[in-house]
Every structure is written in C-alpha cells, then in structure tokens.
Amino acid sequence: MKLLRLGLWLLRRERASGEWRVLLLALVIGVGSVSTTGFLGDRFKRAMRDEGARFLGADLLVTSPRPVESWPAHRLIQSEALEFASMVSHGDTFQLTTVRAIDASYPARGTVKIAAQPFTPGTPSRALPPPGAVYVDQELLPLLGAQVGAQVQLGAAAFRIAGVVTEEPGQLGGVFGLAPRVFLRADEVAATRVLEPGSRVTYLYQFGGPPAALAAFTAALKPRLAPTQRLVGAREGIESLRGAFANTDRYIQLAALVSLLLAVAAIAIAAHRHALRHYDQAGLLRCMGATSGDLRTLYLIQLGTIGLVGSLAGIALGALLQTVLAHLLLPAAVARLPALGPAPLAAGVASGFVALAGASMPALLRLAQVPPLRVLRRDLPPLSGSAWASAGMSLVLLLGLTAWYAGEPKLVAIFVGALTGLALLLALLAQLALGLGRLVQRMSYGPLRFGLAQLLRHRFDSTLQLAAFTLALFLIALLALIRSDLVDGWRQQVPADAPNHFLVNIAPHQQQDVAAFLTRHHLAASELYPMVRGRLTTKNGQAIETTLPPEQTDASTLRRELNLSHTVTLPANNRIIAGQWFGDRRGAEISVETGMAERLGLALGDELGFAVGDQTLHATITSLRSVRWDSMQPNFFVIFAAGPLDDLPASYLAGVRIPDDATGVLPEFVRSFPGVTVLALDKLIAQVGTVFNQIIGAVQLLLGFLLAAGMAVVVATLLASLDARQQEAVLLRTLGAQRAYLAKGLLSEFVVLGLLAGLLAAASAEIAMALIAERLFDLPVKLHPWLWLALPAAGAALVGISGWLTTRHIVRVPPMQSIRALA
Amino acid sequence: MTPPDIPRFPDGAVVSARALSQRVTTADGELTILSDVDLAVAPGETLAITGASGSGKSTLLGLLAGLDRPSAGEIVLLGARLTDLDEDARARLRAGRVGFVFQSFQLLPALSALENILLPLELAGRRDARARAADWLARVGLAERASHTPRQLSGGEQQRVAIARAFATDPQIVFADEPTGNLDVDTGARIIDLLFELNARAGTTLVLVTHDDALASRCARRLHLAAGRVADRVPA
Ligand SMILES: Nc1ncnc2c1ncn2[C@@H]1O[C@H](COP(=O)(O)OP(=O)(O)OP(=O)(O)O)[C@@H](O)[C@H]1O
Ligand SMILES: [Mg+2]
C-alpha cells in the first residue's frame, strides 16, 4: 500500500522525464497498431462465424452447374435456387448483378432481413419477393441511381424494387459490392428470357434438418455427386471461408506486428537509459531502508501503471482507427459488421504488457540490486550485463510475439528470416550511407561538419535510427508505387480500341442477329467465339490427377469447368510458343495456354480428354500459346481446331468496344437480346481498382504506425545519448560556441539522418518495384523521380522534428544550469 | 521538539565495531582498506572520523551504516548484529531510524525540495508525512522554496534540504560523509552550524566523516584513520 503510493507518486513526479514518455509513446504505438487490426479482424470473424447454418442459409448446400434430377430419399427441408449473372437497368444506367432466383422455402436455415430503406436495420421476413417484385442488396441502389419502389429492367421483364436485403445468409459475397445480389421469384425467371441453353447458371440446393437425417443423407449423396458438384456442410463452409480470411487477416496482423517490434526496440532502449539514470535513486532508497523486494514492487507498480495506461490508450486508438479502416475497406458493409468485441481488448493489453515487461523489466529489476554503497562510492560500476539481459530478453520476446501472431512455425520462420535479412541489409546500407556521410563531413564546415561528426560518433545509434526509418519509409513508398504503377499502369496499357464490354451468353440462334446489330452500329468487335464448358479429365489415357507435377497439389483448374472454344485464326494477342497453329485444319487438335501447360505438366503431343456434359472428347496438343491476359480480349486456355466442338451445345462470346458517346446503343442491345449478359469491363476494372486501392489505403494507414514507431526509436536512442550530448554542449558553450551554432549542428545532424533514410528508402523502393513490375506483372520498369524528392523530404522533416524536440533544451539551458545539473 | 526515547542497547552503544577489517581483491591482488578497527558510539554522542584521502573513512562509514559487509569483525547497530543480517534485513533496520547526509547531496532531481524530504517519511510509512516534511523544511529556513527542484537551488540550499531529509524521520543516528566537501568555506560553516543545532535539539547520535579539522573539533570525539588503521583517539 505504502509502496503503491510511493511508486505512483514518483511516477507522477517523473512523468515529464523523457524515458517514461518514450516508453508510453512506444507502447501506445505498438498496442495501437496491433489492436487496430485485431479489432477489425475480430469483427470480420464474428460477422462470418455467428452460425454456420445462418451463414450458409442451410445445414447442407449442394451446388451444381446443372439441375440435379433426383436425390436420395430424405425428409429434410429443401429449397432450390438458381444463381446467374445478369444486367439490371434503371433508365439508362446498367449494373451487373448476381440474380438469385428462389422458391418459397428459401433459405432452408437462418433468416433474411428486409428493409424499406437502405442502411436501416430491417425486419426478419420471407426472402421471396411478391410477384412482379424483387429484393435487392442495398449497395445496388446507388449504383443504379434508383430507390425502393423504382422499376428496374431485368432481361425482358420489369420489376418493382420492393425492399432492400439488409441481412441474409451468405452475405459476404456481396461485401465488396462487385455484383450486388438481386432476389427474384424462381417462377418469374422464364419471363425475363435471360436464360438460354448454354447460359452459365449455378443451381443451389439447400437442406436443413436434424443431424442424424443430415448425416444419412450426406452419406447417400456423396457417391452420387459429379465432380463439378460440390457439397458444403455448414461447418466446412464456414471453415473454408474463415480459413481464407484468417490468412489475409494474419498477414495484415504481421504488418502491424512490425510496428510492435520497432516499439519493443524503442521500449528496450528507453528502459535501459531509465535504469542507468536511476541507479542513484535506487541506491538512495536502499540507504533509506527500502529492501530489494520493496524496490522490485515499486518498479513493478510503475511499469504496471505505464503498461495499463499505454495499453488502454493504444486500444482506444485502435478502436478509433479500426473504424476508419473498416470504412476504407468496406464502405458498403460497415453497417452490417458486429460491434467491437472484447477479445482484442484482452489481446491488446496482453501484447502491451508482454512488450513492455519483456523489454524493460530486465533493466528495471536490476535496479533493485543496486548496492546501497553506491551512494558513498560513485565509482561503483553500473550493473554489468543488464544491457545484454535486456537485449536477450527483447529478442526472446520478439520471437514469442511473432510466433503468437503468425501462428504457424513456417510463417514465423519466414517472417523472422525476412525481417532479419531486411534488418541486416538495412544496417549494411546504413553503414555505407554513413561512410558517405564521412566523405561529406570532410568537405563541409561549420555546424554541418559538427552535426555530421555527431552522427558518425554515435554510429550504432545512427545505424539503428537509419534502419528503422528507412524500413518505414520504404514500405510506405512501395505500397504507394504498387498502387499507382500497377493499377494505373495496367489500365493505361490497355489499347484505346480494346473492347470495353463483353457480350456473354449469346445463344447460337442469336449469333447472326448480334453480328448484324454490331455491324449496324459500326461497333469494333472481336470474333464471336463459341464457348463449350468442359472439364479436363485425362492425359494420355490416365486420370489427370495422377499425372500432376508433385508441387501442384491443389489444381483448381481441374475442378472448375473450362471454357473451351474453337477458332481458325490465332487471336491477335496470342503467340505460338511451341508447335504449330492448326489454322483451318479440321480434327482432334488443341492449342493450350503455356501457363496452364506448365502448371499441369502438359507438353506437345499429349492427348487430353475432356468431359463435356455426358460425352468425352479427346484431342492432341499441337501448339502452346502465350496469352496477353491484360489485352481485354476474350482469351481461352484451350482452343480446339474445327470439328470436335461443332455439334455440342455452345453459347457465344464477343468483346466489343462501345464508344462513350454511343449512349443509346447499350439499352437498345439489352432490350433486343435480354438473355445476353453485358459485362462492362471498364467499370469492372474501376471497381476492382477501387477495392485494391481501399486495401492498400488500409495497409498504408497501418504503416503510419510504423513511421511513428520509427520516430519512437529515434527519440529513444537520442535520449540514451542525451547526457553525453548535454555535457558536450555545455563544454562547447563554455568554450564560446554560440547557441545558433549548436542548434544548427543538432538540426543538421537529424536532417542529414532523415535525408539519408529517405534516399535509402527511395533506392530500395525503386529496386523492389522494378523487380515486382518485371518479374511478377510483366510491366515495363520505370523510375519515379518524385520519390527521390518526397522520401528524403519526408525523412528530413520527421527525423528533424523528433530529433529537435528531444534535444532542443540542450541548446536552451544556460551553461551554468547545465553544469549544476550534471554535477 | 522533544528528543526521541533512546532505547537501551545491550552494550550501551548506538553503534559499535570490534576487530573490523575490510579487504577487497583487485586486479593487483588483495588490498586492505581497513584493519582491526574498534569503536563504540554512545547515544547522543558526536563522532568525527578524520584521515587523509584514501585512508578508508567512507569505507568505515558504509560498514557502520550496514551499507556493506565487512571481511572480518563485528558491528552492532541499533542493537542488531549486522553480520547476522542479510542486505534486506539491514535495510529494514535502517528504515526511519538511520539518516544520511552526503557530500554530493543526493537529492532526486525530479522531486521538489519538500518532496525530497517527504521521501524517507513516505518510505517509513509515517502518517503525518507531509506536515512533518513542511515543518523540517521550515526549520532549515527554506519554507519559501518548497516547490523548487534541486536544479533551482544553490549547493548550500541543496545540502540544507538533504540535512532536513536526514533528520525528518527522527532517526536515532545520522551518518554524514563530508557534508561540506562540495561547499565553500562560509556556506560550509553555516551548514555545520545547522547540523549541530538540529542534532543537539533532537539528541541524535552523529557520525561524520571530514577532512576539516575545525569541523572535527566541534565533535565530542574524534577517530583518526591512517592507511586503514586507527591512529589515535583525540578527545574533544
Ligand atoms: N570495492 C573496492 N575495490 C577496490 N578499492 C576500493 C574499494 N573500496 C574502497 N577502495 C579503495 O580503498 C581506499 C579507501 O577508500 P575510501 O573511499 O574509504 O577513502 P576515504 O578515506 O573516504 O577517501 P576520501 O577522503 O578521498 O573520500 C581507496 O583507495 C579506494 O579506492
Ligand atoms: Mg570518502
């Protein structure tokens, strides 16, 4: 009790001291960064978790590309729905949507909430809209510029929007707002005339019932399932989704962890200096009768208080920023996310305490061992080993925290390896940069020379500061470049006459009419390619699964149905890499895209078997093609020569460029061909770009923490050298150096440090970006002159500010007072 | 202020030492700092320890106060045999009953003058701590400087705060190591006056280390060290 009072009292008295502030600041930054992502991740997870059944809308879901004629006998609740993509229009505005045509028993499990206004809570209700009406995702209304009650056109029929769906099972599909959902009565699908033979439709069969009946049904059903049909149990549905999410979430958490790790470094440095400065205090207290146990309690109370205040402040910051992040990432879905949960709170406090305690306790607890004799014999050495203990403990701690956040050993190893490599590289670069600084110093004079001398003298500190800051600036710059180069670069690469719309699901009997329509309106269009859906099943007579290269364990290409096409002219953006294009030869020949061939271990001369409906087609690979996927032209993995596909049910696909000023064309087309789906590519790209930008924006926000943590490291290292600097400054001033000289010297030291960090970061970002652009995206390498200005400027400003704020009073304090303070 | 009750100690001394030696091992071999020192200080007595620099004065003071362990010999402080006690037990023995004044003042820079005096009172868990601290600050003539930090005080003022701190808990014995060593002659003299005045009023036992003959002569008794041995005893 007495110690509690004393501890808090001393803490309050010393709160203005630099070390406590750095400790607190670093803690707030570290905890803030991990709890921002923690809170958000938790909200997502709970949004998905609540109940498996509610999420799937069923206990059991079977998806199939074709209607399922018969089921094993069962007594389960069953609902049938079909889902397809279609354009919905309101006036002249079009939007691609996912239409779900449902029956009265949909959903088999869980509830749907319908509201009369978007972004209001909604009331539980039947999902089936009244005749002549649809329910739509709330995101659709602004996209169409429509309101509840408005008439929308879906194919050949018009529907009234009777309400918005605010909550539905399986709502996550629409979260990114790419293709908002429209709910339609199954018996009104025919009136829209959207579906033609060959149209791409997914049939959804939901089942609900008691576990025993479900198990029996599942057992009976499994052997009957075709490879293209999928059976999803409530549990596994959730698991697969959560698994996918958990991975993304984990990587974002790791990004946040880097800030926490830098914060740990800052805490360790600050705590070490705090201990150094408190030997006298500890000795004095022991003289006055405090036992080492008392001192330990005292320092633990102080640490605990800092830990609590810092963690809570960090958590508050995290709670605030996660909202910003949620709005950045999912502007449309924020209202649907559950409220903040308590779990990240505990995790935040825990990481805060672990970080603080691990990094600072070794130093502080050694204070309890200060011999009381210290008060009489000033020459007693400061406690040896404490710096190593701190460093060692911090290291263990960093590994522990990493392991905790990363979850699996492999990821920990990769992360730690990458971080260590990066740290070593940065340290090396920093050393080189400082070598450069020495050169400059030789040529400079006055305060700059003095500042550079300081920088070089505190070489270890400078390296640390430089590395921390370079890392932060580098990552931020890299993301900015990825955002600007990849997204914009990709868009700019698309030729001006490239198609901006795809016409999909053109029925064979419409072929001529569509071609005529395109000619009549003078639209530049690609060939009309037939599309037959089939699955790759065999290679040279063997089941394809058994022939895969060893590293190719999960070949999603195999489970999906491929779009098989045939044409006699090699598409313009394709290039033959091996073999010969079959041209107008008829026969069982195919041309395969090289990437696919590589993944599946296919070579020229291989005979492949495809399951198309209930038939099997065999054809031999006579050429391999490279395809420019970013050409915006219709592209295919597998192209057949004329012959084999001729008699199979096909739908046709064309790419067409509709000029921006040809406003009337699209509405007319959609009215004339209600079954044809029009994909607005430019709009889709813009939407994908927006989502991408949102994600990068969110990650950049997290990197702001990294920058702040970098500043904390700078401040902590500067504080550690403050006494020595002060002594030196006093000496210089007594020797006649003017304030302005000292101030300029200090400032030039930090500005140079910041400039160097900026330059290093710019160089690293350019190199990394060049590698990414060339190796991963096949984009031309280009330099970014603005980077070489912006990063050094930002570095100079940030390091300058934090350095100056930490050390400015060295210059301000009159020498007399400094001498007395140092005595 | 009435002097505190002075309990009777077994051998009648507040602090006593017998056959006290201190040896340390250094890089150049074993070094004897103190050898065979005997002494006893009676309640209320004032003792000056004098000697040349390096003669072992501070070492002896530290041993008597229980800040360190002797290599040989026995010390009894406030009735307890220090050699039987571990470091923490010796600390508990000191709490509130032993005061210190140092050459370098040893005030905590973050605390004000008043708070520096408050520190040992809080540590000893005294209830009227704040009032007592204010009272002692006034007694050393610094009532108006209560909120000033050590940085804002002169050396003499700082040492006065340190003296108030040493006496604030009504200790039975005060150890002072060259309390005027960092001060000019005039200031030093005034500090000494203050020290003796407070000591006389409180009836505290005082053991002080000094170079200064004038100061030593104001003590009731004097112990002169030469190369770690007691050279002679000079009664006042
Ligand atoms: N632990 C130790 N290790 C090595 N040498 C020591 C140790 N403790 C004391 N000494 C040495 O013993 C000698 C006596 O030290 P002490 O501090 O007691 O002298 P002093 O009489 O107080 O001197 P001064 O008047 O200069 O303060 C000195 O030479 C000192 O360096
Ligand atoms: Mg001494």
Image (tube, grey):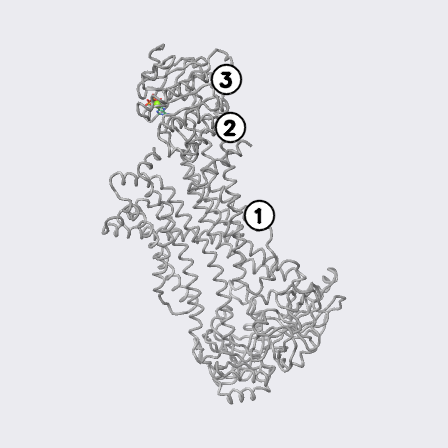
Gap between marks 2 and 1, in whole Å?
Answer: 39 Å
| Residue B109 placement (x, y as % from top left) | 41, 34
Mark 2 vs mark 1, foreground winner is: 2
Q: Secondary structure at mark 1?
A: helix
Q: Secondary structure at mark 3?
A: loop
Question: Foreground residue, A416 or B11?
Answer: B11
Ligand 2, what quadrant?
top left
Q: Are marks 3 and 1 in contact (CB under 8 Å)?
A: no
* Amino acid type assigned to the residue bearing label 1 in the image: Ala
Question: Foreground residue, A83 or B136?
Answer: B136
Mark 3 vs mark 1, foreground winner is: 3
Question: Do tags 2 and 1 sit on the same chain?
Answer: no
Q: Which residue is labeled 1 in the image?
A: A346
Residue positioned 35% across, 30% down in the render? B154
Judge from the rendering whether residue A784 lies leftward or rightward of residue A439; answer left or right.
right
Q: Which residue is labeled 3 in the image?
A: B4
